[in-house]
Amino acid sequence: MSQDPATFAPHVDAAWREDLVLELRLHDVPGDAIGAALAEVEAYCLDSGQSAQEAFGDARAYGVALAEAAGRRDDEPVPVRTVVPAAVETLGMVATTTGAVAWLRGETADVHLSAVVVVVLLGAVMVAITRWPTPVLRYLFDASVWRVVLVSLLVPGLAVGVALLARDASVALPAPPLTGLGLALLVTGTVLTVTLQESLSGDPVRSPDGADASGPTPWWFRLLAYAHLWGAWLVTAVLVVALSVAPRP
């Protein structure tokens, strides 16, 4: 079902409305409570003739006040299950790419120290997201584009640095079993992600009586929602093809 907050507050400034919903989502406020808050803002603004900014002040600050009144905190850890699928998919991509490329070349798979560094760093990032979800997400949402770019380049940059400084730090493994393990991890990560996605999509922004005022979700929206799934497989396939045909240094 559609989760468009504009359904419940069509006359409220879009930017203000989106900031409020984002803040409430960051505090893990349920969808029906968010719908009730939007309906209250909509009704008050229509009756008073004021804008949401004039009546309630800054949307983010108002969202914090609502969340605190509902007993929601922004420093509570989230379940580990929310990051397990991404971790499994990442391991699957690394193992499949390394194993398949070596297999196609008729060689043993050299697992370089840089790959271990990538896995460890990504694990640390996922632990941070699990333990401090709201501060991490708020940092990314409030950051400038350049800050986000620099953060996204941190892991691959360190991996490249390790690869350059420790060229011979690797372990040789048989390629076919490593490829099979990687594909099994990719399939497992995909299944876990679909399961998690379905459970998380069960809390749309809705009215307090549980009704969702909008129609079915368009097929293209659901396709985009699962883009990261086929994206992981696509990226892995492209890497395998590109690296297997590339000349060895």
Image: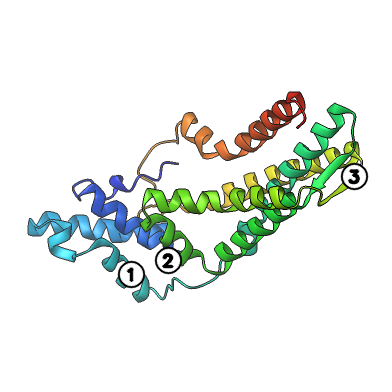
Q: Residue 160: x percent and y percent?
A: 65, 47
Q: Residue 29: x percent and y percent?
A: 42, 64
Q: Is residue 202 visible?
A: no
Residue topped by disc 1: 64
- The kind of residue on which mark 2 rests is His
Nearer the viewer's eye, disc 3 or disc 2?
3
Residue topped by disc 2: 27
> What residue appears at the point 18 percent right and 65 percent down from the top-left corner?
57
Query: Which sits in the foreground, 216 or 160?
Result: 160
Nearer the viewer's eye, disc 3 or disc 1?
3
Q: CA distance from mark 3 to mark 2?
A: 45 Å
- The kind of residue on which mark 3 rests is Leu
| Element marked by disc 1 | helix
Q: CA distance from mark 3 to mark 1?
A: 52 Å
Disc 3 packing (10 Å; few <14; some 14–19; many ≥20): some
Closer to the chain start, of discs 3 and 1, is: 1
Disc 1 packing (10 Å; few <14; some 14–19; many ≥20): some
Residue 173 has which mark? 3
| Element marked by disc 3 | strand
| Element marked by disc 2 | loop
